[in-house]
Image (spheres, rainbow, N blue to C red):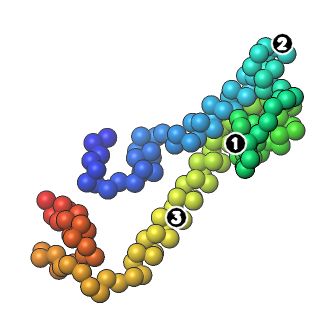
């Protein structure tokens, strides 16, 4: 792809050029696929017993409980449009479950792109709305830089 750091290309543009999805979407896909495999397992399988098991004894530390696999799964099932109580019924049809996973990844990626674009817009709007009245001028373009570090960074663009 021959992208250099100086090209100042966003992560999203790199993903678009490589026709790839984000690592977050890959994790979502892997978790939903693994959950389907566990549900399809025999009831005597250890992963399935652990998946459906609950602790009978033990204690929790004070404060917010640590996130468990099941907690993350509930969040990810929202992207898939599957209610946690309907998980077994939704994953019973393997081809339907694969289609559900694909649609969940598509929904997640679209939402992630919109959130990133909105955040980027807010950042750029905030930076452009505050004029720099004092600073160090660039000798070539007469641009004012807020700090000497900013001037050095700006001077790299002249190379």
The answer to whether the residues at label 1 and label 2 have Cβ atoms under 8 Å apart is no
State the CA–CA distance, disc 3 to disc 2.
47 Å
Q: Is residue 116 above or below residue 100?
A: below
Residue at left offset 18%, top offset 61%: 156
| Labels 3, 2: front one | 2
Label 2 sits on a secondary structure element that is loop
- The residue identified by callout 3 is 119
- The residue identified by callout 2 is 44
Q: Is residue 65 above or below residue 53?
A: below
- Residue situated in front as seen by the camera: 74 or 103: 74
- Mark earlier in primary sequence (1, 3): 1
Q: What mark, if any, has residue 19 been given in the picture?
A: none
The answer to whether the residues at label 1 and label 3 have Cβ atoms under 8 Å apart is no
Residue 143 lies in quadrant: bottom left
State the CA–CA distance, disc 1 to disc 3.
28 Å
User: In this image, 105 relative to 6: left or right?
Assistant: right
- Residue situated in front as seen by the camera: 143 or 72: 72
User: In this image, 137 relative to 106: left or right?
Assistant: left
User: In this image, 93 relative to 122: left or right?
Assistant: right
Label 3 sits on a secondary structure element that is helix
- The residue identified by callout 1 is 66
Residue at left offset 52%, top offset 40%: 23
Q: x%, y% of residue 131?
A: 35, 84
């Amino acid at each position: 792809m021959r992208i250099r750091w100086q090209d100042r290309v966003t992560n999203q543009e790199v993903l678009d050029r490589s026709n790839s999805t984000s690592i977050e979407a890959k994790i979502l896909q892997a978790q939903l696929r693994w959950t389907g495999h566990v549900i399809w397992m025999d009831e005597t399988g250890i992963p399935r017993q652990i998946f459906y098991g609950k602790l009978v004894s033990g204690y929790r530390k004070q404060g917010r409980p640590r996130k468990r696999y099941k907690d993350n799964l509930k969040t990810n099932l929202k992207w898939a449009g599957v209610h946690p109580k309907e998980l077994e019924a939704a994953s019973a049809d393997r081809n339907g479950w694969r289609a559900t996973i694909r649609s969940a990844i598509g929904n997640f990626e679209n939402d992630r792109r919109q959130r990133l674009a909105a955040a980027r817009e807010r950042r750029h709007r905030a930076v452009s709305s505050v004029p720099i009245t004092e600073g160090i001028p660039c000798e070539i373009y007469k641009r004012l830089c807020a700090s000497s570090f900013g001037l050095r960074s700006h001077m790299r663009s002249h190379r």
